[in-house]
């Protein structure tokens, strides 16, 4: 079983919402355990807190209408950029270790094959490499936060 098969199995288990899966062949055995439901509830409740704060401020309603126009403009500007996406579910880290420097910053040049981050899944730290060459324009994920499969991580200007 190669790493892609293991990653696909992890994705399947996380979507199936089961607590544990064991897979065994003559040569190979793997056990995948998912977090308890209590930890998932706390993760889901965080976005609710973010949505509650703007609703409490009535002055934010008129301000959000003009803010939508620049957001639409930036969305059209982002179309020229290439997105580096997460190939798996896990925890996103910008550094190889807490005492080390980050892999890339905004403005850094990257080439195909350069490591841009690490995603930890099931106590395995997977180095994520850039598939394109260009300049990092934006980092879309905070350090040490959970990421989903195919979630955008970086915007890269290929020009």
Image (cartoon, rainbow, N blue to C red):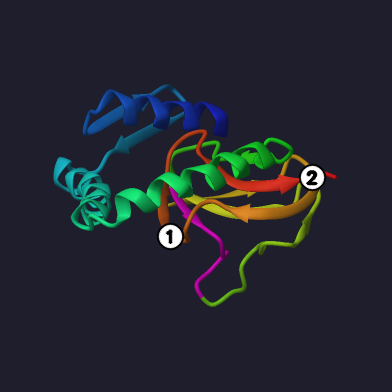
**Callout 1 environment at 10 Å: few (<14), some (14 to 19), or many (20+)?**
some
Is 48 placed left or right of 101 in the picture? left
Numbered mark located on residue 26 in the image? none
User: Splitting the image into 4 quarters, where does residue 159 fall?
Assistant: top right
The image position of residue 127, as x and y in percent, is: 60, 50
Q: Going 31% across and 49% down the picture, which residue do you hit?
A: 61
The image position of residue 10, as x and y in percent, is: 40, 32
Q: Label 2, label 1: how many angstroms apart (C-alpha)?
A: 24 Å
The image position of residue 35, as x and y in percent, is: 24, 44
Measured along the vertical axis of the image, is residue 7 above or below residue 46? above
Furthest toward the left, the residue is: 38
User: Splitting the image into 4 quarters, where does residue 117 fall?
Assistant: bottom right
Q: What stretch is highlighted in magenta?
A: 91-98
* Magenta portion: prevailing SS class: loop
**Callout 2 environment at 10 Å: few (<14), some (14 to 19), or many (20+)?**
few
- Which residue, given by chain and number where applicable, does mark 1 sit on? 144
The image position of residue 4, as x and y in percent, is: 56, 29
Furthest toward the bottom, the residue is: 99
Q: Does the magenta stretch include residue 151?
A: no
Numbered mark located on residue 112 in the image? 2
Q: Going 77% across and 41% down the picture, which residue do you hit?
A: 132
């Amino acid at each position: 079983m190669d790493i892609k098969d293991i990653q696909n199995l992890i994705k399947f288990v996380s979507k199936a919402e089961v607590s544990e899966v064991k897979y065994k062949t003559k040569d190979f055995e793997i056990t995948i355990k998912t977090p308890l439901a209590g930890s998932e509830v706390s993760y889901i409740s965080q976005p609710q807190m973010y949505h509650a704060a703007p609703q409490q401020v009535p002055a934010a309603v008129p301000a959000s209408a003009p803010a939508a126009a620049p957001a639409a403009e930036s969305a059209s500007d982002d179309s020229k950029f290439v997105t580096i996406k997460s190939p798996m579910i896990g925890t996103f880290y910008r550094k190889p270790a807490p005492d080390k420097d980050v892999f890339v910053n905004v403005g850094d040049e990257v080439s195909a094959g350069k490591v841009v981050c690490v995603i930890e899944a099931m106590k395995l730290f997977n180095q994520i490499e850039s598939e394109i060459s260009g300049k990092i324009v934006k980092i879309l994920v905070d350090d040490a936060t959970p990421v989903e499969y195919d979630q955008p991580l970086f915007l890269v200007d290929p020009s």
